[in-house]
Every structure is written in structure tokens, then in C-alpha cells.
Image: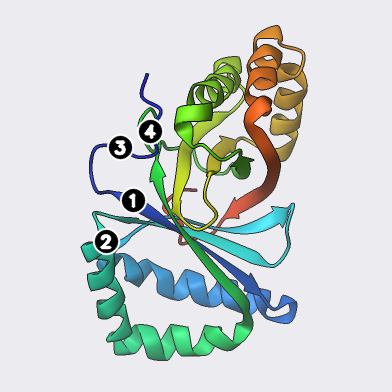
Amino acid sequence: LATGPRQNNGIFYEIRTYDIKPAKMKEFLELANKHFPFCPAHSELVGFWYTDLGALNKVFHIWKYDNFAHRTAVRNALANDKDWQGKFISVVRPMMEKQHNEIAYLVPWCQLGKPPKEGGVYEWVTFQMKPGGPALWGEAFRAAINAHINTGYTRLIGVFHTEYGLLNTVHVLWWNESPDHRAAGRHSAHEDARVVAAVRDSVRFLESQQNVLLIPMQCSPLK
């Protein structure tokens, strides 16, 4: 059973989080929807969301890179893109209160998925695991994820393990038809003996957990 933090290639994902000034959130979203469709000419945008529950005035976006040299080339290209810098970056920078990024790999047993249809909501769950890495907690964590998948109420999009940022962190991205559909599914899952057993085994390695409900933006490839 492969439980290592990365797949056998150089592909990784940059997870960027921006805290936006509350008074500027609407304007930021409008500008992002207008300008971000042009950014994938430099790199692949996986998804772009704003938070609805669990956090406020935050946006999440995920970018895919072939390797670190690819990211460096993209960053250089964007830095020299006069339209990108002049029409978007210089305008939205004063709207931001804080920026944060992480580099993460998909775990080897997970391929990046897609929702069965557009129009749902996403849940971003962050698990802070005990030091030791996937060699310590990988099998138990995978079993807990699979137990939830097998209930059928939710769709797994991706499981990411950090390489840069807060280490021993795992992010899981789920898709659900609606917040109410998720709530009903979670309630049912908590009464499923298989889920209860798998989660009980996994939480032995868990230090903290947090989630946010995400709404996909118009410019997001994942909707």
C-alpha cells in the first residue's frame, strides 16, 4: 500500500489563500472573474473559490505545475505580463489583507477528480496530523477517506499532502450537491459502523481539523 506524500512525477499543486478586505470582497471577485481566465495561458488553474462557511472574506485557488522550474518560469512570465500586472495585480493588491501559499502533492492513491455536474458546493477539510508523515498515519487516513467515499453521499476531488508550508498537513477537497445534501450525508455516515471504525482508527494520529465551505467562482474550471 503506497502511502507516501507524492506521486512518481514532479507534478505539484500550489494552494493560494487570500484574505480580502470585507468592503472590497465584491469588487475583488468581479475583477478575478474578469481577468483570471487569461492567466491559464501561463499555468493551469485547477479551481478558484470563495468561502461561505467556516471562514469569511477569503478566496482559495489551486494551480498545477509540472515541476519547480515550470513554476519559476510562470512566475517570471506573469511578472513581465503588463496587462496582468497593470489591470489586475496592481488593482487588487490594496484589497488584500494577507496572502498565504502552500506547495502540496496529491497522495499516490488519489487522482484529481471532477464533480459529476456543475452547480454544487465544495468542502475543503484540513487535517493536521501528528509528526511522522504518511509512513505513520497514511494507511489509517486512507481507510477513513475511503469509508466516507463508500457511503456515496459525497464526491472526492483530491487529497493533498504538504511539501512546503505547515508540514504533516493534509487537505481533502470534497464536492457535494448542496450544503443540505452534505449535512444529511454526514448524519447518515456517522451512523455507519464502517465509517465510525475507520475514523476512530484515524483520529489516533490527528492533532486538529478545520473545514470551510467553498463556492466556485465563474472563472473556476472546477464548478
Circle number at residue 12:
1
User: What residue does disc 4 label?
Assistant: 4
User: What residue does disc 3 label?
Assistant: 7
- The kind of residue on which mark 4 rests is Gly
Please give the name of the residue rendered at 31% of the width and 79% of the height, measured from the top-left corner. 78
User: What residue does disc 2 label?
Assistant: 68
Spatial distance from mark 1 to mark 2, Cα to Cα? 8 Å
Q: Residues within 10 Å of mark 1 (few under 14, many from 20)?
A: many
Q: Is residue 220 above or below residue 88?
A: above
Position in image of residue 122 (x %, y %): 59, 44
The image's colour scheme reads rainbow
Please give the name of the residue rendered at 62% of the width and 35% of the height, measured from the top-left corner. 177
The part of the image, by quadrant, that contains residue 95 is bottom right
- The kind of residue on which mark 3 rests is Gln
Along the line of sight, the residue nearer the viewer: 86 or 158: 158
Q: Is residue 50 above or below residue 21?
A: above
The reply to whether callout 3 and callout 4 are in contact (CB within 8 Å) is no
Spatial distance from mark 2 to mark 3, Cα to Cα? 15 Å
Along the line of sight, the residue nearer the viewer: 210 or 118: 210
Spatial distance from mark 1 to mark 4, Cα to Cα? 14 Å
SS label for mark 2: helix
Circle number at residue 204:
none
Q: Is residue 108 left or right of residue 199?
A: left
Position in image of residue 134 (x %, y %): 47, 32
Q: Nearer the viewer, mark 1 or mark 4?
A: 4
